[in-house]
Image (spheres, grey):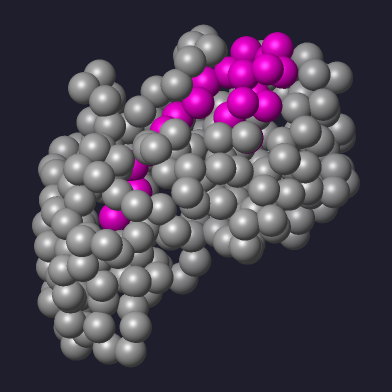
């Protein structure tokens, strides 16, 4: 089965490509570096021709509100137009748990636009909303750092390992399109400030965590429910302590 992964050389995409190839699929790991650019449309028609499914795990290289909206709108339209012309039978996209509740953030406003484009396209689809990856904790810490102090709220978070995300995407890709949204989370809940504190301590990072109930998450306010999945979500298997040993080396999530 031919499967095209948009963002196929990135953090999730490269892992998904390797897994699907090991299962015997014909995988195109599409990215600008391979001559396939969803944002410009370059190479899209050729890449998706003859494919059964397209998995979109691409991301914007900028978190600027206008830039990220332009990316997801433009890339989404180009991709869906190419898929419609090619008769793609399953469009699978990776999104984020809490997107509807994080609309103060330009990034999550853009992700909701991306989701709505898919729903309105007429192409059979499955949207996978994942909680934050364990591998994303360092990014959360950096975004909340001022000087040598990290300011975070105490909202609940239920992070998931990237391996569990990849396994879920591969499993759903192999099935029929659900034409709905599936949520995925890890097996444990943490207070956000406590999770990042544990991560920094285990990583021998000297920064100090300060609880700030008014701190935002990439520009959006959090409640205890914002980052937590619904009761019917899929649950990954890897726990935080298991993921931390040995400490993973993360170069990029894009």
Is residue 130 shown in magenta?
yes
Left or right placement of residue 80 versus residue 119 in this view: right
The residue under the point 49% across, 51% down is 105
- Looking at the image, residue 209 sits to the left or right of residue 184; the answer is left
Q: Relative to 20, say whether 217 is above or below.
A: below
Q: Nearer the viewer, residue 75 or 63?
A: 63
168 in relation to 189, above or below: above
Q: Quadrant of residue 243?
A: bottom left
Q: Left or right: 30 with respect to 128?
A: right
Residue at the spot x=34%, y=83% of the render? Answer: 146
Q: Whole-percent x and y of residue 43?
A: 86, 43
Q: Is residue 105 visible?
A: yes
Instruction: Specify the quadrant of the image occupied by residue 210.
Output: bottom left
Residue 242 appears at what percent x and percent y?
14, 54
In which quadrant will I find the C terminus? bottom right
Inspect the magenta stretch and tell me whether residue 195 lies in it: no
Q: Is residue 8 visible?
A: no
Q: Position of residue 92 (x, y in %)?
A: 56, 27
* Segment colored magenta: 114-135
The spot of residue 21 in percent (x, y) is 54, 37
Residue at 29% from the left image edge and 42% from the top image edge: 227
């Amino acid at each position: 089965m031919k499967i095209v992964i948009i963002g196929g050389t990135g953090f999730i995409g490269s892992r998904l490509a390797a897994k699907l190839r090991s299962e015997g699929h014909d995988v195109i790991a599409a990215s600008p570096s391979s001559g396939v650019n969803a944002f410009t449309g370059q190479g899209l028609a050729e890449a998706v021709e003859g494919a059964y499914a397209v998995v979109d795990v691409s991301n914007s290289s900028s978190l600027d509100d206008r830039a990220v909206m332009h990316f997801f709108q433009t890339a989404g339209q180009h991709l869906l137009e190419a898929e419609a012309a090619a008769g793609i039978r399953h469009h699978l996209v990776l999104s984020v748990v809490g997107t509807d509740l994080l609309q103060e953030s330009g990034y999550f406003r853009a992700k909701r636009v991306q989701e709505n484009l898919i729903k309105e396209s007429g192409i059979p689809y499955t949207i996978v909303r994942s909680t934050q990856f364990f591998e994303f904790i360092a990014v959360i810490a950096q975004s909340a750092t001022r000087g040598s102090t990290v300011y975070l709220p105490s909202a609940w978070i239920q992070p998931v390992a990237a391996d569990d995300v990849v396994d879920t995407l591969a499993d759903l890709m192999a099935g029929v399109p659900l034409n709905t949204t599936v949520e995925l989370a890890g097996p444990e809940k943490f207070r956000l400030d406590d999770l990042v504190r544990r991560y920094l301590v285990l990583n021998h990072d000297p920064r100090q965590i300060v609880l700030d109930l008014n701190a935002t998450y990439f520009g959006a306010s959090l409640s205890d429910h914002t980052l937590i999945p619904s009761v019917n979500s899929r649950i990954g298997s890897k726990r935080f302590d298991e993921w931390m040993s040995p400490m993973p080396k993360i170069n990029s999530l894009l």
